Image: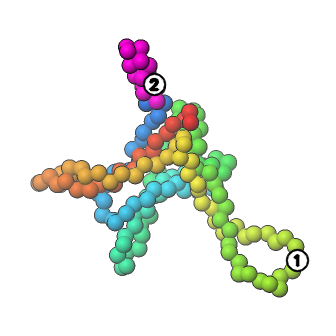
């Protein structure tokens, strides 16, 4: 019995030692919904986290907040996080092509697709963004309130 309990504790401890959680952002939730994505500047080799605040109201546009995270960068078509000298892939670059209308009179042969931009596909196994909206105590200096917050964390499992 003790051996089984010891093995279970060792397994649980080993899973927790290899994963790392990094707080990316924490603020009051004032929008209806929130998404978090990776994005990058290919020319400057920089990566960041984009927090998209989605408003259901017609009069409000969605708001995008860029969050710089130390250790996050763009390298060779990938957004990577530097974890003690080891590059952990968080997202892979994908090309976004322009849609062309169907032309039945086009010339035969293969035409090149026009690239209009890039997006980044997340890698959920080893590096993922976690977005939660817990109720936390907020103190304005005069009174305390329980308000809904948005908390974004980067969870890294380098061995997956």
Residue occupying image coordinates x 68% and y 48%:
76
Q: Secondary structure beneath disc 2?
A: helix
Residue under label 2 = 11
* 51 shown above or below 152: below
Say which of 93 and 8 sits in front: 8
Dot 2 crowding, Cα within 10 Å, few <14, some 14–19, many 20+: few
Q: Residue furthest left?
A: 142
Is 73 above or below relative to 118?
Answer: above
The image quadrant of residue 143 is: bottom left
Q: Nearer the viewer, mark 1 or mark 2?
A: 2
Left/right placement of residue 16 relative to residue 115 reads left
Q: Is residue 127 visible?
A: yes
Q: Is residue 35 above or below residue 86?
A: below
Residue at the outermost front position: 1
Q: Secondary structure at mark 1?
A: loop
Identified at 79% across, 69% down, the residue is 112
* In this picture, residue 138 sits left or right of residue 32: left
């Amino acid at each position: 019995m003790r051996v089984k309990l010891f093995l279970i504790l060792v397994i649980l401890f080993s899973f927790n030692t290899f994963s790392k959680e990094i707080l990316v952002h924490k603020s009051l939730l004032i929008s209806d919904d929130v998404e978090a994505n990776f994005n990058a500047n290919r020319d400057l080799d920089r990566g960041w986290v984009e927090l998209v605040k989605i408003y259901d109201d017609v009069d409000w546009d969605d708001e995008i907040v860029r969050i710089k995270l130390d250790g996050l960068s763009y390298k060779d078509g990938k957004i990577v996080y530097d974890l003690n000298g080891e590059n952990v892939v968080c997202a892979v670059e994908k090309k976004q092509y322009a849609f062309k209308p169907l032309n039945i009179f086009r010339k035969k042969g293969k035409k090149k697709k026009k690239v209009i931009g890039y997006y980044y596909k997340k890698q959920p196994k080893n590096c993922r963004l976690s977005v939660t909206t817990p109720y936390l105590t907020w103190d304005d200096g005069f009174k305390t309130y329980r308000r809904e917050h948005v908390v974004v964390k980067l969870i890294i499992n380098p061995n997956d």
